[in-house]
Image (cartoon, rainbow, N blue to C red):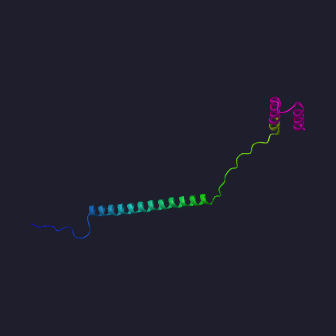
Amino acid sequence: MVFRAGRIGRPGLLGAVARTAVVAGTARATANAVDRHSQQRNAEQQAYTQQQAYAQQPAQYAPPPAAPDQPGDDLVDKLQRLGELHASGALSDQEFAAAKAQLLR
């Protein structure tokens, strides 16, 4: 009986296909790893850039809204207080009339 030790020379069709599949799979895995590393590095760079831009912005606080100056309301409030003082007896009729005349000028 003759034993064959194996094929000598170039590999057969199945061997070539298998070798090609291994090389292509390794290349794809390497490319995926490089892509993931690149995406991670870009995301870190973008986050750093945003953080630096935020840190460089001056703190901007909005001042509280100013109460509108309405002299009519203020005058009405003062007249009401004068009326209350007059009604309570703290102001006499003459004092009330003088204070009211001064406010209405």
Left or right side of 25 for 53: right
From the viewer's perspective, is residue 83 above or below residue 49?
above
Position of residue 72 measured from the top left corner of the image (x, y, whole percent): 82, 37
Of 87 and 73, the residue lying toward us = 87
Q: Quadrant of the C terminus?
A: top right
Q: Is residue 96 magenta?
A: yes
Q: Quadrant of the N terminus?
A: bottom left
Seen from this angle, which residue lies furthest left?
A: 1
Of 67 and 76, the residue lying toward us = 76
Left or right side of 88 for 97: right
From the viewer's perspective, is residue 7 above or below residue 83?
below
Left or right side of 23 for 102: right
User: Dominant secondary structure of the magenta stretch?
Assistant: helix
Position of residue 42 measured from the top left corner of the image (x, y, whole percent): 51, 60
Left or right side of 97 for 34: left
Of 18 and 85, the residue lying toward us = 85
Position of residue 50 measured from the top left corner of the image (x, y, whole percent): 57, 58
Q: Is residue 90 magenta?
A: yes
Seen from this angle, which residue lies furthest bottom?
A: 9
Give the quadrant of residue 12: bottom left
Q: Which residues are magenta?
A: 77-105
Seen from this angle, which residue lies furthest top?
A: 87
Q: How many marks?
A: 0
Give the quadrant of residue 87: top right
Residue at the image position 53 percent from the left and 58 percent from the top: 47
